[in-house]
Amino acid sequence: MAIVVHGVEGVRALPVGEPLGSSGLVEVTQEAVNRFAEATGDHQWIHVDVERAKSGPFGGPIAHGYLTLSLVPRLLPEIVEFTGFGLTVNYGCEKVRFPSPVPVGSKVRATATLEEVTEVRGGLQLAITMTIAVADAPKPACVATILIRQMT
C-alpha cells in the first residue's frame, strides 16, 4: 500500500536517502514486449523472436531496457502517492542503468528512495532512485534516478 504524502510539508517530512517502500509484482509478458517493439520500432530479435532468442545469450526473449524503465509511472504510485499539488511533471532522469536482463515471463517489483528535494519556481523537484528488480534475482534490472516536479 502506498504511503500518502500531502503537500510541501509532507514532502519535506520524508526521509532522504532511505527507501520509501516497494511495489507489488508485475509480470512482463511477451505481448507487452511485442507492443513495446511496435510502439518504438525496436524489433531486435532478443526481444521479439522467441525461437531465435532461446539459443541466444539469455536463453529466451528479454524485455527492452526502456520497457523496464517505462514501468516507473505504473509502479511508483504503488509506493508513494502525492496529494495537495496542482500538477505533477515528469522532468526527466539523472542516470539510468540496466545491470541485468528481464526475462519474458518474469515478475518485477520496484523500490523507491528519495535522494533529494529541491525548491523550484512554483513547487518542488524530487530526485527519486527507482530500482526495478526481477523477483529473486541477485542484481537489479534497472536503476534510474528520476526527477519529478510537484507544482503547487
Image (cartoon, grey):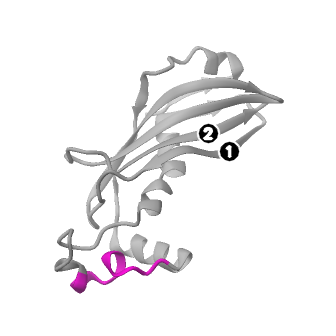
Q: Residue at x 68, y 44 (%)?
A: 91
Q: CA distance from mark 1 to mark 2?
A: 5 Å
Residue 115 located left or right of residue 100: right
CB atoms at circles 1 and 2 under 8 Å apart? yes
Q: Can the viewer see residue 25 in this picture?
A: no
> Taking 60 as reference, is 84 left or right?
right
Q: Secondary structure at mark 1?
A: strand
Q: Residue at x 62, y 21 (%)?
A: 11
**The label number, if any, that marks residue 147 in the structure image:** 2
Image quadrant where one finds the N terminus = top left
N-terminal of the pair, mark 1 or mark 2, is 1
Q: Which mark is residue 2?
A: none
Residue 42 versus residue 117 in the image, above or below: below
The disc labelled 2 sits on which kind of residue? Leu
Based on the displayed image, in which of its 4 quarters is residue 147 positioned?
Answer: top right
Q: Is residue 46 magenta?
A: yes
* Residue 63 in the image: above or below residue 31: above
- Asked whether, in this view, residue 55 is left or right of residue 46, the answer is left
x, y (%) of residue 56?
20, 76
Residue bearing the label numbered 1: 91
Q: Residues within 10 Å of mark 2 (few under 14, many from 20)?
A: many
Q: Crowding near pointer 1: few (<14 within 10 Å), some, many (20+)?
A: some
Q: Amino acid at mark 1?
A: Tyr
Prevalent SS, magenta region: helix
> What x and y, as percent, mark residue 50?
26, 81
* SS state under label 2: strand
> Does the magenta run of residues contain 123?
no
Residue at point 47%, 40% (across, down): 78
- Residue 141: x, y in percent? 33, 51
Q: Which residues, given as a range, are shown in magenta? A: 42-52
Residue at position x 46%, y 21% in the image:
17
Toward which corner of the image does residue 143 lie, by quadrant? top left
